[in-house]
Image (cartoon, helix red, strand yellow):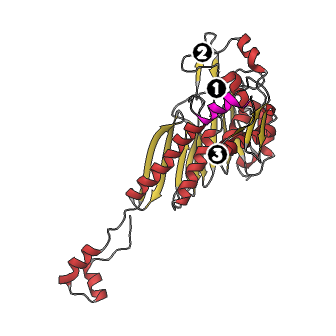
Amino acid sequence: MHQNRCNAFTICRFIGLNPSVFLLFFVLLPSVAQADWFQYTDTAMTTPVELEFWATDKRAADNIAESVLAVFHQVDTDMSRYREDSELSGLNQLAANGPVHVSSGLYQVLKKAEEVAVLSEGAFDISFGSVGYLYDYRERQQPSAEEIQSRLGHINFQDIVLDDRAQTVFFRQQGLLIDLGGIAKGYAVDLGIELLKAAGVSHARLSAGGDLRLLGDRRGRPWLVGVRDPRSKTRNVVMLPLTDLAISTSGDYERFFIDDQGERVHHILSPGTGKSVRGVQSVTIIGSDALTTDGLSTAVFVLGPEKGLEMIEKLPDIDAIIIDDQRMMHFTEGLAPPES
């Protein structure tokens, strides 16, 4: 790497010093920082977190990375369905009894979830947790048809009442449970990017599972982001050159098991049936922030290729790639190759 430097004789001649005193002068100078790409990994929110950014000093980079990665653990503490002491768990326990005041971060995520739910006409619905909590993908457990039916009526985002002035949340019915697994990671990625910006970082890549956000470019070149083949752990179906964008992918391969009938039981549930969505293998959404792309990727997955693309085409500066269960790729007009 080229840096603007001059040797001892050049400096001595320039400032008129005798070379015999240069050693003392040199010792008093601060050491030159070594700029480079720095990479960090962690596990939080039940998913791998990866951070890469350009910085001028390793010690400073380490401090920045520590702050950014801590964001994911804090969001997990606040919004995890798996932690009994999380703010989300407390909300699920109390909100049907009366309005519950929540933190600004949780309220922001709930407002975005409401926005995507309205936009998708309920295809994205965080109250799917009312049934979703009955599934255990690690233990290969799923609820019976009777259990699903008994709780299906609790899935209704319109029964989640948000009061902007009081910053409170109220559930209109007992038994409603919310799950932020389809949107909270995107929120954490956005928070991490804001921290990087505040620290003066201009080139970065930050991901948590299927949610990724890019800050700037890769120092004169675009970042190359692969869209994974849903049936391969190593193969990408397409590579996208991107800068300063967010990209989120929802797939039926993230948390799943194959049941006794040979059916894939995965974590993206239809709010209408309480069962795993069929017809789609993965959805990738490209936009300006990860909170939005995270929610939209789940919404489009539930809607399917035709209705999903119809919704996305109405949104400015948002694009989508859908791979259906026949392994056919569908994408928005903004990603179409230019006509020759």
- Which amino acid is tagged 1? His
Cα separation, mark 2 vs mark 1, equals: 12 Å
Q: Nearer the viewer, residue 180 or 91?
A: 91
Residue 114 percent across, percent down from the top left: 76, 39
Residue 249 percent across, percent down from the top left: 63, 38
- The residue at 72%/29% (across/down) is 127
Q: Name the residue under label 3.
A: 105
Residue 281 visible in the snapshot: no
Q: In this view, does 157 lie to the left or right of 58?
A: right
Asked if the residue at tag 1 contacts the one at tag 2, i.e. Cβ–Cβ closer than 8 Å, the answer is no
Residue that sits furthest to the left in the current view: 20
Region in magenta: 86-95
Query: Please, is residue 10 above or below residue 193 in the view?
Result: below
Q: What secondary structure is found at the residue carrying circle 1?
A: loop
Q: What secondary structure is found at the residue carrying circle 3?
A: helix
Q: Main secondary structure of the magenta part?
A: helix
Of tags 1 and 3, the one toward the viewer is 3
Marked residue nearer the N-terminal end (1 or 3): 3
- The residue at 55%/59% (across/down) is 198
- Which amino acid is tagged 3? Gly
Residue 132 is covered by the magenta coloring: no
Q: Name the residue under label 2.
A: 141
Query: Please, is residue 11 above or below residue 81 in the view?
Result: below
Marked residue nearer the N-terminal end (2 or 3): 3
Q: Name the residue under label 1.
A: 267
Q: Nearer the viewer, residue 147 or 227?
A: 147
Residue 174 percent across, percent down from the top left: 75, 24
